[in-house]
Amino acid sequence: MDCAFMLWLFAVSVVASAFGGMHGMASGIFIVPILTMFGHIEIHTAIGASIVSVIACSCGGAAPFLENGMTNVRLAIVLETATTMGALTGVLLVGIVPSSYLYSLFTVILFLSARQMLARRRDPAFAYVPAVTNNWLDSSYPDQELGRDVSYRVHRVPLGMMLMYGAGLISALLGIGSGVLKIPAMDAAMRLPIKVSSATSNFMIGVTAAASAGAYFMRGNITTAVAGPVALGSVLGAIVGARMLLIVSNDRLRLLFVIVLLALGLQMLLTVFGVQPL
Amino acid sequence: MNRTSPLEQSLAALLRYGSWLASAAIGLGFALALIDSRVGTRNLAILPSMRIASMGIVLFILLPSLRVLLMLLVFIREGDFRFAAAAGLVLVIISLSVIFVL
């Protein structure tokens, strides 16, 4: 593996992570298709590299949300029992699922993510509750725009946990953050405010990914020469993406994002049928 | 406005400094490998300095488990046993995923 290839890995990871970060997505959804189709890296090695970058972005980005009181750490640890259980199932399946199935599943996730990106996220009609509640998972967060604490109630935890199990499973199989399942779980099922949902989801992604990263590492799928540049590039890209989010118009980017997701989905689909587009 | 608890402050510190340390190790490992490669091999993957980068990757993989461990200890100290049990269960599941592939 030469120096030029590692620099290429670093560069594409910076771009993928900055681009994904502008839409609150981890870079994994772009990294695996790019590494397999353009870098011609074996899919399990690509997933291994991606899962490390997912952890790096989650851990690297968590501190500001925690310090601002956006992350519901108690809800996170309860939901993580479901995501890690899903990841454990994924770890057991990954050795027996053929690569073509992984490409097919990735295609479905790319198309679903494109569809989800077209539908704007709105704050769900979450119930404002008094500051003191009896529910052990309810909490509050400081809303800078309103200038006060907003209390919220956590709804339908069992349904949320079922979706989180699926998110953990997909994360372990494909090496992604599984935003495509976490967003409906947090917004639609549990009706969390978007700021809490984004912060808590980002916080959880690292632990979910760690549950499968250990297994990928033990299997020898995490090679430093690939995972190192990808992780470092993703962390840098996430910082750049967060900055760019403040200065770039979101609507045109959203459309570009959908087009890229569809193009990658199409290429993955062609790979399933043995057509090597590039 | 609500002030974050010591738990959230400690978690933020652990994740922030842990990520910096892991990223620095990966960056340093690659920088040394690049310098080494100018005098010898073109294959960076086999250079000894890549071990430093590997340690950075291992730290990233362990960091989420360390933060669950920190949560477990804080919940036990606060007598919040429901959440301590959840944190303990998460650690067991993560350990099982590694044990199953051995």
Image (spheres, coloured by chain):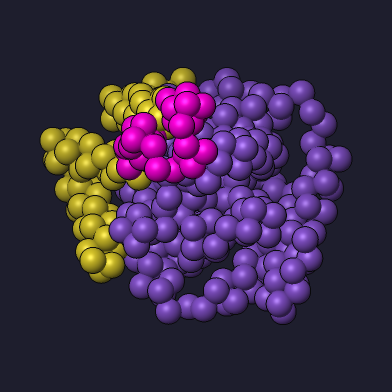
Color of chain A here? purple
- Residue drawn at (79%, 45%) of the image: A254
- Residue drawn at (33%, 49%) of the image: A77
- Quadrant of residue A63 within the rendered picture: top left
Q: How far from the left and from the top, in percent, is residue B40? A: 46, 32
- Residue drawn at (17%, 38%) of the image: B73
Q: How far from the left and from the top, in percent, is residue B41? A: 47, 37
User: Does the magenta portion include B57?
Assistant: yes
- Quadrant of residue A5 within the rendered picture: top right
The residue lying toward the viewer, choosing from B48 and A24, is B48
- Residue drawn at (62%, 70%) of the image: A103
Question: Is residue B80 toward the left or the right of residue B31 in the image?
Answer: left
Q: How far from the left and from the top, in percent, is residue B76? A: 14, 41
Q: Which chain is yellow?
A: B
The quadrant the C terminus of chain B occupies is: bottom left
Question: Is residue A101 toward the left or the right of residue A112 in the image?
Answer: left
B59 vs A180: above or below: above
The residue lying toward the viewer, choosing from A107 and B68, is A107
User: Which residues fall within the magenta stretch?
Assistant: B32-60
Q: Is residue A88 visible?
A: yes
Q: How far from the left and from the top, in percent, is residue A233? A: 57, 35
- Quadrant of residue A74 within the rendered picture: top left
